Image (spheres, helix red, strand yellow):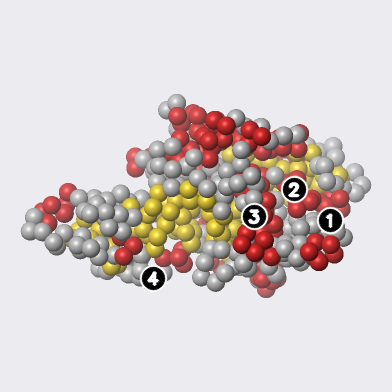
Amino acid sequence: MLSTQDNELLTQVGPGTPMGELFRRYWAPVMLVGDVGAPDSDPVRVTILGEKLIAFRDTAGKIGLLSAYCPHRRASLYWGRNEEHGLRCAYHGWKFDVDGQCTDMPNCPEGVTLKDRVKTPAYPTVERGGIIWAYLGPRDRVPAFPSIQIMHTPESHRHIIKISMNCSYLQTLEGDVDLGHTSFLHSRHDNETSAGMNFLHSKVYKTALFEDKAPHFFFTETDWGMMHGVRRQAEGNMYHWRVGQFLMPAMNLIASQRGSMVLANIRIPVDDEHSLLFRCFINPERPLDDADRAVIAAGVMAPEMIPGTSTMKENASNDYMRDQYITRAENYTGIKSVPAQDAAMTEDQDGPIPDRSKEYLVSSDRVIIGLRKKLLTRVKDLMAGQEPPEPSNPDAYAVRGVDVFLPRDVSIEDGTRDLVRVEAPVS
């Protein structure tokens, strides 16, 4: 279990909180590239890490991410006019560029000279892998963008969905590294692989994945965060290893077969009780083909979304569209998509922030415990004045998840030594 104090430390993420400050030391995903539209299009509201912001794409195509409120009279810049390389407040006409510098102050005679001394908070942004990322930390510590292979691929190679979650980031992140739940939550009564999951689990995997429900769990701390996974019994003298990669502070590369699409979950807190999931389907080696897109269209690994929103059609308001017939005849939960199955567990897990002091942990929770210790170490070190090491080591992030069968006398370290690392992409 986790103490009440440590639970609060990990889940309070607003400005000035220790965990909020830790997240601000890393590049944070804030929205999809398509969310901001074309140059000079309407601004967009964004809330990340408990901070209300406004995003816009200026005349030159640059992304601005500003404090939501004009420093003059605190009117919302959401109502502003995006025009001629800046965002103009609709209340009194003050205008700001993507760096937060006031470029026009037309409502007062001293504005001609005073404007140069006025700035509003603004954050650096980059576009990588179809996502707009922002750095919300100290401006003298802006790190290089990490060498995450799948974030350096062209548009033709990827499909990304942004999903709103009505719970803290932490229980969703814990679900990502808890590979044991697959044998139950995502299983079928016939132990076959659901339609749309075949890119992760071919039929030869079904016995190992779904029939061995008490696998061996392991994790190893790494320069990028943590390598973790499960070992299951397989036919003959083999083990089935599923090895995921946790990338600090809240990204998980799901175990996948070599040459297949890579599935990644990127988490970011919106506030203490809400978070975003960027669910990424990416092939680093080639454009997505018809088979890849059929996996996405099947509605199992990629949920159906309410058009124009980040809300799944399967959501808490309709009990995730659980079908009792399917529960009895087909899959374990009666819920169609894997993300909705996960959401049913994490959004209804003793509230938006569970009281982890009441948990009863067992040996199969060792990866969860390892994740919590990793995050607690980093946040407590930062509280003591020690910066996290990962932002200054971007090439450490050039890794991948692995799904492989190995002889039982081969260790996971030896068997995956040439599989985990990938060539660091060039930004």
Disc 3 + disc 4, Cβ < 8 Å: no
Q: Residue at x 10, y 53 (%)?
A: 113
**Residue at the far bottom in the pictured view:** 290
Q: Is residue 5 above or below residue 173?
A: above
Crowd rating for badge 4 (residues with CA inside 10 Å; few <14, some 14–19, many 20+) = some
Question: Circle 4 is placed at which residue position?
Answer: 38
Q: Is residue 307 above or below residue 101?
A: below
The quarter of the displayed image where residue 68 is located: bottom left
Question: Circle 3 is placed at which residue position?
Answer: 343
Per the model, the C-alpha gap separating discs 1 and 4 is: 46 Å
What's the amino acid at mark 4? Ala
Crowd rating for badge 3 (residues with CA inside 10 Å; few <14, some 14–19, many 20+) = many
* Nearer mark to the viewer, of 3 and 2: 3
* Nearer mark to the viewer, of 2 and 1: 2
Choose the circle earlier in sequence order: 1 or 4: 4
Choose the circle earlier in sequence order: 2 or 1: 2
The quarter of the displayed image where residue 318 is located: bottom right
What's the amino acid at mark 1? Lys
**Residue at the far right in the pictured view:** 236
